[in-house]
Image (tube, rainbow, N blue to C red):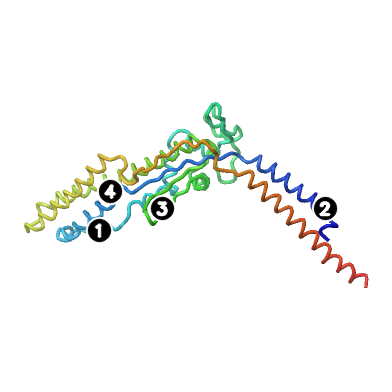
Amino acid sequence: VVWANKKLIILLTACFALTSVFYSLTLKDIYKSEAILSVAGESSMSSSLASLGGLASLAGLNLPTGNADKSVVALEIIQTRDFLRHLMTIENILPSIMASKSYDISSKKIIFDPKIYNITNEEWVREPAKNRQPKPSYLEAHKTYLDMITVERDKLNNLISISVEHLSPIFAKDLLELIINETNEIIRSKDLQASSDAIMFLNNEIPKATLITMREAINRLVQSQLETQMLSKVSKEYVLKVVEPPFVPEIKSKPIRVLICFLGTLLGFMGSLIFVLVRHYVFSNEDKLSDH
């Protein structure tokens, strides 16, 4: 049956093969920049906070024991809508995410879709869908942003891998650097504010303390908060420490056009075989039954 319909099989397979070739050629080259990170000062900070737990209880305060992993918080922050809204305040981030059309290798610049964004006037000119504005909101851009980034953590060595995919290899690297730096800065600023508030509160509590042991406990707590402030101000890599920095990729990560063409041809061949066999054994039998 297959041999008798070999011309039809070859024709259908060729159609699928050509279609897959044309489809693969329409896909844009995507570049991936990656970085490997570790958690800065995680063990020492955790043990320090744990040792102060008893002193905090003497002072009538509740401090975290250090079991909470700040790196987990950092990785969640990276993927939040609010973090994207913060990134969108930086110049050219939103147009590069939502209006990129192609990448000019010679000039190393992103070419924006003129139907979406006018680069000359820096104006959004797209026709928005219902309940949306010409300028994409952070809620709309969030899905595209999540499709661009990948965040993974190796449970064996506790290293963190973050990658960004984009039409522009330079923007992929710049955005990844920005994500790491801004995440560290956001957590650092929050910890600075929290430690400042704690120091102010503890200093107000010292005169109220009647027992010497309680005053010593409060002083130790103040000291620990001062150490937190020192670490926050000294180190830029407050939570996420770079092991391997982001890079400008030289080779595209996708699409793999050869694989697309192979799978398309294989799909066409298998589909044509099934079509020929079903037509011969199913429909021919139905025709015979109807004749009887």
**Which of the marked residues, 4 or 1, is nearer the chain's N terminus?**
4
- Spatial distance from mark 1 to mark 2, Cα to Cα? 72 Å
Residue lying at 14% horizontally and 53% vertically, measured from the top left: 218
Q: Residue under label 1, please give it.
A: 65
Q: Amino acid at mark 4?
A: Gly
Q: Residue under label 3, please give it.
A: 153
Residue lying at 74% horizontally and 56% vertically, measured from the top left: 271
**Which of the marked residues, 2 or 4, is nearer the chain's N terminus?**
2
Q: Secondary structure at mark 3?
A: strand
Q: Position of residue 24 (x, y in %)?
A: 65, 43
**Left or right side of 44 for 165:** right
Residue 91 location, quadrant: top left
Residue 228 visible in the snapshot: yes
Q: Position of residue 93 (x, y in %)?
A: 47, 36
Q: Quadrant of the N terminus?
A: bottom right
- Label 2 vs label 4, nearer the camera: 2
Q: Secondary structure at mark 2?
A: helix
Q: Position of residue 229 (x, y in %)?
A: 23, 44
Numbered marks: total: 4
Q: Secondary structure at mark 4?
A: loop
- Spatial distance from mark 3 to mark 4, Cα to Cα? 17 Å
**Left or right side of 265 for 157:** left
